[in-house]
Image (cartoon, helix red, strand yellow):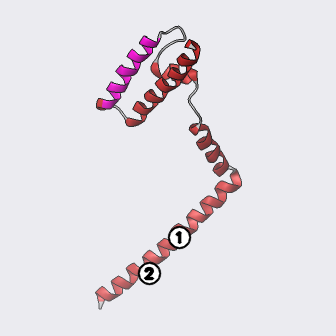
Amino acid sequence: MAAKLLANLIIMGSGILGRAVVQAYRKALENANKTGVAQETLNNIRRASRAMTEQEARQILGVTEQSSWDEIVQKYDILFERNAKNGSFYLQSKVHRAKECLDSVYQQNSS
């Protein structure tokens, strides 16, 4: 008898809690749309998906505009390997994208 009562209480409580979570989520979405947070988030995602600038690539690799291509490749190798062993995949991919960006810049300048 007590087990049946306890089971009913758990089921009713989880139903109430589930409805409250859904209601809170809807309210959060509604508030985000009112305050513009949702639009700002979309803009940040769009901004992040843009190609890396030459300046950002140079900062990531720690090189200057006067650096030779050999220096850039050397910095790339060091940073890429360091992040491959005990770093993060995110940083490793940023290093790779930085080298790709500077590669295109140096190819344009050599043409």
Q: Main secondary structure of the magenta part?
A: helix
The number of discs equals 2
For disc 1, the marked residue is 20
- Whether 102 is among the magenta residues is no
Residue at the image position 37 percent from the left and 34 percent from the top: 88
Question: Quick check: 43 above or below 28?
Answer: above
Residue at numbered disc 2: 12
Three-letter amino acid code at the position of disc 2: Met
Q: Is 23 left or right of 76, judged from the image as shown?
A: right
Q: Image quadrant for the C terminus?
A: top right
Q: Nearer the viewer, residue 77 or 11?
A: 77
Which residue is farthest bottom?
Answer: 1
Magenta-colored span: 69-84
The residue at the point 32 percent across, 88 percent down is: 4
Earlier along the polypeptide chain: callout 2 or callout 1?
2
Q: Amino acid at mark 1?
A: Ala
Q: Quadrant of residue 32?
A: bottom right
Decide if residue 37 is on the left or right side of residue 88: right
At x 50%, y 21%, the residue is 103
Q: Nearer the viewer, residue 10 or 55?
A: 55
Answer whether labels 2 and 1 touch (C-beta < 8 Å).
no
Question: Residue 1: x, y in percent?
Answer: 29, 91
Occupied quadrant, residue 26: bottom right
Label 2, label 1: how far apart the Cα atoms are: 12 Å
